[in-house]
Amino acid sequence: MYTDYTDEEETNDSYYDDSDNNNNFDKEKIKKIAFFVIAFVIFVILVIVLAKSCSRGKTNDNSSTNNNSLVPSLAISRPNISIKVNENFELFVDVINSKSKNPVITWWSEDTKIAAVSDDGVVTGISEGTTNVVAVYLEGKKAYSTKCAVTVSKSQTAATAIDIEQENIAIPKNQKVLLQIKVTPENAEMPKLIFESENSNVALVSDDGYVTAVSTGFTTVRVKSEDGKLSDSVSVRVIETGGSTVINPVAINIMGLTNGISVGTSAKINYEVLPSNATNKNVTWASTNSNIARVDSSGTVTGVSAGKATIVATTSNGITAQIEVNVNSNKVAVQSVQINNGTSLNMNQGGTTKLSYTISPSNATNKNVTFTTSDSRIVYVDSNGVMAALSAGNAVVTVKTEDGNKTSAINVTVLGQQSSGSSGSTSQPSGSTGSSSGSSSSSGSSSSSSSSSSSSSTDTSSSKACDSQSMVTISHNGKSQSPKAVVSSISFGNATAFTASTTPIITVDEINNCIDTANGRLLYKVYYGTTESSISSRVNGGDGQIKKGTQISLNNGNGYYKITINGYITGSLIAINKTYYAIVKRTTTSSSSSSANVYMTGLSAKINGSNLVLTASASNIGGVGIKGFKYCLMKTTSGTCTNFDTPTSTTKVGMYAVSGYPLTASKTLNVVYDKSYKRACVLAYDKNNKRSSARCVNYS
C-alpha cells in the first residue's frame, strides 16, 4: 500500500508542474494576440487617414470629382444701378460651382429701348425708364440667371453759355428789376448762379437775380456760374423818378389763367410791365395755336377747341413773356335717346306721323340725330323724323344720335287700304270708295267699277314704290371701259373706279313720277376727297337742279365722289334722299390739266394772326412726281391768276417746293397776311415742270 501511495504523490506532483507550464504558455499567447490586434487597429487607422488625405489631394487636383452634386449659382456685382442716357456701366458676374473653368455669360436687356448691354456686360442708357439686365449661364441643358435692375434718367446737358437778355437797364430809384437769364443750349441744365454788383451803393442784386436801384449812377451787374466758367454782365443805370428820360420795359409779369378756360369762353390775361414807370407799356399778343386758343389785342383769350396753346406777350422793345393756356372741353355727352311714341305704332297706308324723341341729358352739347328705316318701301322717314306709310307691312324706324351713337327704335305696322264693299274689289282704296258712295244711285255700280279700274290703272303706272331707291335712275359713260365702272348707291366698297381718260359723267335717265320736280325741289350736290375718309369739299358749283337728262361731271381729278340727290314726294313735305358713290382713278390727265401729270385735289385758306395759311394738296397720275406748288394772291374775289411767276400791281406770287417727288402731296403755305388781297389761287407742278390747272379760294 505504501508503494501505491508514493506513486500517487509523484503522479500528483507531476500534474501540478504541467499546470504551471500551461499557464505560462497562455499568457505568452495572449500577449502576442494583443500585439497583433493593436497593430491591426493602428494599420486600419493609418489606412483611413491616408485614404482621406488622398481624397483631399484628388479634390484639389480635380474639383469636378467632388462637385457632381452641387448646383451652379451666379453672383452679380451690382443688383441695381442708376445711370443717365448715353452713360455706361460695366457689370461683372461670378459663377459658383461651375463645372467649367471658364464659364461663358450671355447678357441681354429686357427693354432695349431703355437700356442696352454688350456681350461683356457693359450697360448703356438709351432713354428714361426702368428695366432689367439679365446675365445667363448655360450648363448642359440647364440655364442659370441673375438680374440687375437698371434705372435710366435723362442726361443733363451742360450749359456752354449764360446770357442776360436785357441790355443797358435803366431803373428808377427805389425800383427793382428781375434779370432774365438764358442758358445755351436751350435744353441745358441751368447751373447754380452767383450775382454781384460792382457798386452796391448804386444798385444791389439779390441771390435770385433781382436788381434794386439804390441811388442815381451807373454800375455793372454780373452773373456767373458757381464754378466761374460761365459769366455775363449788364450795365445798370439808376435814374431819378420822373424826368423826360425814356425808360424801356425790362420784363413782363403775366398772371392768371392758371385753371385754364373752357371752349367758347373768354378770359383776360392780367399782366404787369416792369419797371412800373416804363415809358411805353404797350404789349402785343399772339397765340402759338389759334385753332385751340385765340387772343385779341387786349390780351383776352378765347377757347376754340380742347388742347393747349401758348400765349405770348411782347413789348415795344422786344421783351417777351408767355403763358401756357389749357382749353377744356365743355362738351356734355349724350347718355341716351328715347322715342316718345312708344315701342310700336300702327299707321294707315298713305298717312304720315312725326316721331318725337327725348335726348338725355337735356343739356347735351350735340343733339343731332339721324333717322333710318329697315324697309323704305313700307315706311319712309325723312331727316326730321317724319314717317310716311307707303305700303302694307312692318318696318323698324330707328333714331341714332351723332354723339355716342345712342339709338332708340319703334316697330311700325302699316295697315293696307280697305276695299270697297259695293264693288268687292280688293285693290280699291278707301278714298275711292268714299268718292263713289257720293255718286247717284243709278250709276253707283258703274262708278264703283270705274273707280276701281282707275285705281288699278294708277297703280300700274306707279308700280315703283316712292322711296329713295327708286326716286331716280342714272347711267354713266364708264360702261365702255374694262372693267366697267360702277356707281354704287350703297358704298364705295361696292363701286368700281372710272379709269378711262375721258371725264366721268353721270346722266339722270329717269325720275319717278311720284317725285316733285317743279320749282327746283329736286337737287344734287357733289362732294369730293382724295381719300374715302377725307370727303369734305363740295364741287361742281354746289347745288344743281335735276331734270331728266341732267349730266353731272366728276371733274375734280382722281379721288372719291359722293353725289347726294334730295327731293320731295309730290304734294307733300316728305323729303326723300339718295346717295351715289363713285371712284375716279383715271390713267391720264383731264383736259383742264393742260396735259400735265399733276392736278390739284384740294385747297383751303384761313387767317392765323399775321399769316394767311393755305393748305394745298395734289396728286400725280403719270408717275413723274410732284415738285411743288405756286400761289398767286389777288385783290379781286373772282377769276384766276394768269401769271404765277411774276407779281403785278394787283397780285402777289410765290412758290413752295416738295421734297422727294411724291405721287401725292399736301403742303401748308404760310404767307404774310395782307387784307388788301382777298383771293388765293394755287397750282401744282411736276418734276418736268408741267403745271396743273389752278384752284382758287376767297378768304377774309
Image (spheres, rainbow, N blue to C red):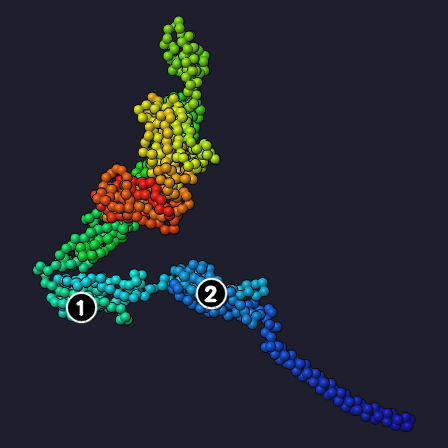
Q: Is residue 664 among what the camera can see?
A: yes
Asked which quadrant contains residue 130, the reply is bottom left
- Relative depth, front residue between 230 and 358: 230
Quarter the N terminus occupies: bottom right
Residue at 14 percent of width and 67 percent of height: 218
Residue at 24 percent of width and 68 percent of height: 231
Q: Could you tell me the amino acid type at mark 1?
A: Thr
Helix, strand or loop at label 2? It is loop
- Relative depth, front residue between 506 and 462: 506
Q: Which residue is mark 1?
A: 220
Circles 1 and 2: CB distance less than 8 Å? no
Would you call the spot at circle 1 few (<14 residues within 10 Å), some (14-19), or many (20 or more)? some
Would you call the spot at circle 2 few (<14 residues within 10 Å), some (14-19), or many (20 or more)? few
Helix, strand or loop at label 1? It is strand
Q: Could you tell me the amino acid type at mark 2?
A: Ser
| CA distance separating discs 1 and 2 | 53 Å
Q: Which residue is mark 2?
A: 118
Q: Is residue 700 above or below residue 276?
A: above
- Percent x, y of residue 512: 39, 23
- Percent x, y of residue 542: 32, 33
Q: Is residue 239 above or below residue 534?
A: below
Say which label, 1 or 2, has the lower sequence index: 2
